[in-house]
Image (cartoon, rainbow, N blue to C red):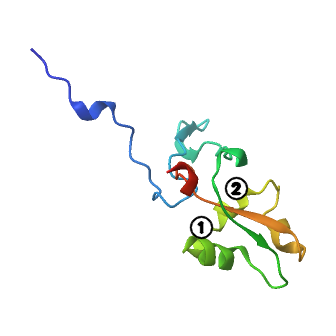
Amino acid sequence: MTVDDPLNGLPAPSPYPLTSRYHGVPVALHTTPDRRQVPYLQRRLLPSADGLTPLAEHTVSAGDRLDLLANRYLGSADQWWRIADANPVVDPRELIATPGRRITIALPGAVPGVGNA
């Protein structure tokens, strides 16, 4: 009688930490004409802004930077990409280009807000 290893059903560990925007993005292999295999990350799909829980709304001031806003609202400057994900723009620099613009600061995906707890 064989016993299945219960760990076989677990996904492979991510090469990126939980706080990285690339955590959980699958790694694929490209085979070159000379048969070398080159790993690459598959496309990272942006989360739906509607599915994120708003934490705050910020009015942009001259001199604002996404890393400083991420540190202020999310506690870590390297989480600036979460602010970009919560606001539909092509270039994250657009978010802080115009003083007076209101941008959404959202909780990371799958984190319930106060009203959802």
Which x, y percent locates residue 85? Answer: 70, 55
Which x, y percent locates residue 82? Answer: 64, 61
Pointer 2 and pointer 1: residues touching (CB < 8 Å)?
no
Q: Is residue 28 above or below residue 113?
A: above
The three-letter amino acid code for the residue at tag 1 is: Gln
What residue do we see at 90% from left, 73% from top? 98
Quadrant in the rendering for residue 84:
bottom right
Q: Is residue 48 above or below residue 84?
A: above
Relative to the observer, which residue lies in front, 46 or 61?
61
- Label 2, secondary structure: give it: helix
Q: Residues within 10 Å of mark 1 (few under 14, many from 20)?
A: many
Left or right, 5 with reference to 15: left
Left or right, 73 with reference to 9: right
Left or right, 20 with reference to 50: left
Quarter in which the N terminus is drawn: top left
Left or right, 21 with reference to 63: left
Q: Is residue 77 above or below residue 38?
A: below
Q: Which residue is mark 1?
A: 79
What residue do we see at 57% from left, 46% from top? 40
The three-letter amino acid code for the residue at tag 2 is: Asp
Relative to the observer, which residue lies in front, 84 or 35?
84
What residue do we see at 23% from left, 31% from top? 6
Q: Tell me the distance, in whole angstroms, between the alpha carbons under discs 2 and 1.
A: 10 Å
Relative to the observer, which residue lies in front, 89 or 56?
56
Residue 6 circle label: none
Which x, y percent locates residue 66? Answer: 71, 73
In the image, farthest residue toward the left: 1
Residue 85 circle label: 2
Which x, y percent locates residue 4? Answer: 20, 24
